[in-house]
Image: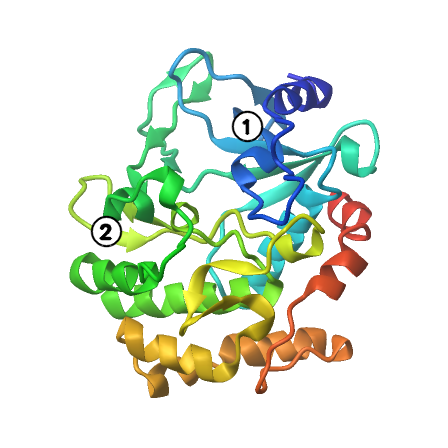
Amino acid sequence: MSAEEVKRLAQEGATESAELVTKAHLSLTGASGKVGLYYDNEKDEWYLPYGDAPSTHIVKQSHVRLKNIVANEQLCLLTAKKLGIEVPESFIVKTTGIDSEDVLFATKRYDRKISVNNKKINGLTIPYRIHQEDFAQALGIASSDKYETNNEEYLVKMFLILRNYSASPIEDQLKLWDICVFNYLIGNTDNHVKNLSLLYSEDLKLIRLAPAYDIVSTIVYETSTEKMALRVGDVYKLSDIRKGDFEKEAKKVGLGKNIAMKRKDIVKRWNCLYYKMNLRWGNNVYTTGPYIQRYSGKILPAVAG
């Protein structure tokens, strides 16, 4: 399958409902055209899975109204990785050029496993599906209720699940905390419960927090809201959140102020990366809106090689 065919399939998944006229949460489910494909890394070839055959990658194309959204996501994922947050492998797929409309974004599925013992069809190894469930499923929350609207304390409930069921509860709680801090730093107000998941072992006996995914700086788009999908402390509005609100939230989720606020590695690395942008962990933490706007265009030739 050629890159142009991959692009066409991704375009077919695009919807016109991704960007709302009024200020609202940008649901990333419809913000990019996307398709599940099989990628042969050795041959650098793409295949469309037949029937219910498993895919290995999710390929996205920018929505026409959300400029550079795939570059935005790649930039945010690479930044998260640089800060020590576990994320899926991802890369830019070039088609006819490096303009935003010609760039595709591929994410390797972390809920797939390929080993030498897997069956093969026409020389291609069939991936094994690893069970995952997002926190909406785990908490019995309807998709329509994935954003907090009335102080439902979703974060408190998610931390409780990790504390009670994770095979490594302390590590996973700290990982989830880091993701929450990072979403705030980049201005991701689409950080709802379906964008955080649990990953099961092959025998379904062990549960871990899944890698971070669908991380985008939504605040750079005029149609996006400043209201976070998950409140911090008692605050939803991004620009109103202060360091004290994180301290309050840390206590609520059971980490405690001292442990959570000592997780400064992510913030120290953030400050080192973006000191020129005057982004600091102080009384108020500024988001990366200016950073994303400045570099989302430049990342296309940089990561497309």
Q: Is residue 276 above or below residue 88?
A: below
- In the image, residue 212 lies at what x, y percent? 46, 53
Kind of residue indicated by mark 1: Tyr
Residue 293 shows in this picture: yes
Q: Please rate how many residues cluster around mark 2, counting C-alpha atoms within 10 Å: few if below 14, some from 14 to 19, many from 20.
A: some
Q: Is residue 262 left or right of residue 35?
A: left
- In the image, residue 255 lies at what x, y percent? 30, 77
Residue displayed at 69% across by 34% down: 63
- In the image, residue 141 lies at what x, y percent? 29, 44
Q: CA distance from mark 1 to mark 2?
A: 27 Å
- In the image, residue 130 lies at what x, y percent? 31, 36
Seen from the viewer's position, the closer of residues 162 and 17 is: 17
Q: Which mark is residue 287?
A: none
The colour style of the image is: rainbow
Kind of residue indicated by mark 2: Ile
Determine the image quadrant of residue 170. bottom left
Which residue carries the number 1 mark?
39
Check disc 2 and report its element: helix, strand or loop.
strand
Quarter containing the C terminus: top right
Quarter containing the N terminus: top right
Q: Earlier in the sequence, mark 1 or mark 2?
A: 1
Seen from the viewer's position, the closer of residues 278 and 49 is: 278
Which residue carries the number 2 mark?
207
> Does the CB distance between marks 1 and 2 fall below 8 Å?
no
Check disc 1 and report its element: helix, strand or loop.
strand
Residue displayed at 42% across by 84% down: 261
Q: Is residue 130 left or right of residue 23?
A: left
Q: Nearer the viewer, mark 1 or mark 2?
A: 2
Q: Is residue 37 left or right of residue 64?
A: left
Determine the image quadrant of residue 125. top left
Residue 263 shows in this picture: no
Q: Is residue 15 above or below residue 136?
A: above
